[in-house]
Amino acid sequence: VKPDYSDAYGLAKISLDPVTVPKTPDNLSVAFESDHIFRLTWHDNSNNELAFILERSIDSESQFVAYDTLDVNSVSTLDHQVEAHVPFFYRLKAVGDGGQSEYSNVASFEWVTAPAAQLSLTVTEQNDNELLLTWTGNVEHHDGFIIERSEVQNSGYTPLDTVWTDTYAYVDVVELEKTYFYKVDAYNKAGRKSSNEVTSIISGNGSDEKRL
């Protein structure tokens, strides 16, 4: 066995640690921050990454492209280039001297705004106790329509029914000689857009309709 003279001659001992691949980041999530901005957060599970590579897809969970390079030890970022009514998918990986980690989970989010709609509602008497509601308008990004009725102007509305996006007519069975007020709302998960309010008085001899 040869003696170790490194200390005697002032020689430095060097120990080389093996270079390892960074651990995979996980718990990636995305949430609405403000108009046109998403906030992404994740867990950094490694201590040897040099950066994170964020990838984004706008139409599926497979067509990802590199979107941003993020600093070492970062655990959040903002995406400032978000469009409404488009689903965005994200994934993340850590990179270091030892290579690249596996990808994190895929996280997605869609920013939905209230429907864009200009609805015009009309009500006509179809039979003695039936009113036909029809509405027209340019409606975008809606999940359907909510028909509402009240016996008091501008208040007390209750839902009658919900119909599909391609439905633009509804028949309501009513009592004679009563006044009814109607509205139709285009809706989605972000909110509603209402039509004009229409009142109709049923006398048995034809309805008296008035737009408000």
Image (tube, rainbow, N blue to C red):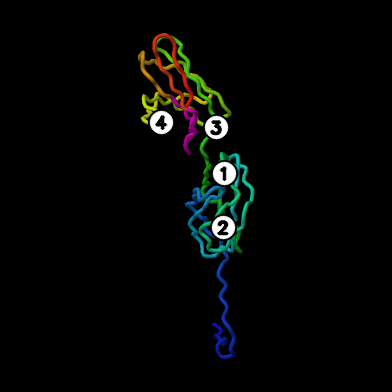
| Label at residue 47 | none
Discs 4/2, front:
4
| 4 or 2: tag closer to the N-terminus | 2
| 3 or 2: tag closer to the N-terminus | 2
| Label at residue 94 | 2
Q: Amino acid at mark 2?
A: Ala
Q: Amino acid at mark 1?
A: Phe
- Where does label 1 land, which residue? 88
Residue 69: give x, y in percent of width and height. Answer: 61, 58
Discs 4/3, front:
4
For the residues labelled 4 and 2, the Cα–Cα distance comes to 57 Å
Please give left or right for residue 92 compared with residue 207 in the image.
right
Q: Which residues are magenta?
A: 182-196
| Label at residue 117 | 3
Q: Residue at x 56, y 57 (%)?
A: 94
| 2 or 1: tag closer to the N-terminus | 1
- Where does label 4 land, which residue? 154
Q: Residue at x 53, y 63 (%)?
A: 73
| 1 or 4: tag closer to the N-terminus | 1
Structural crowding at the residue carrying mark 4, measured as other residues with C-alpha within 10 Å and reported as few (<14), some (14–19) or many (≥20):
few
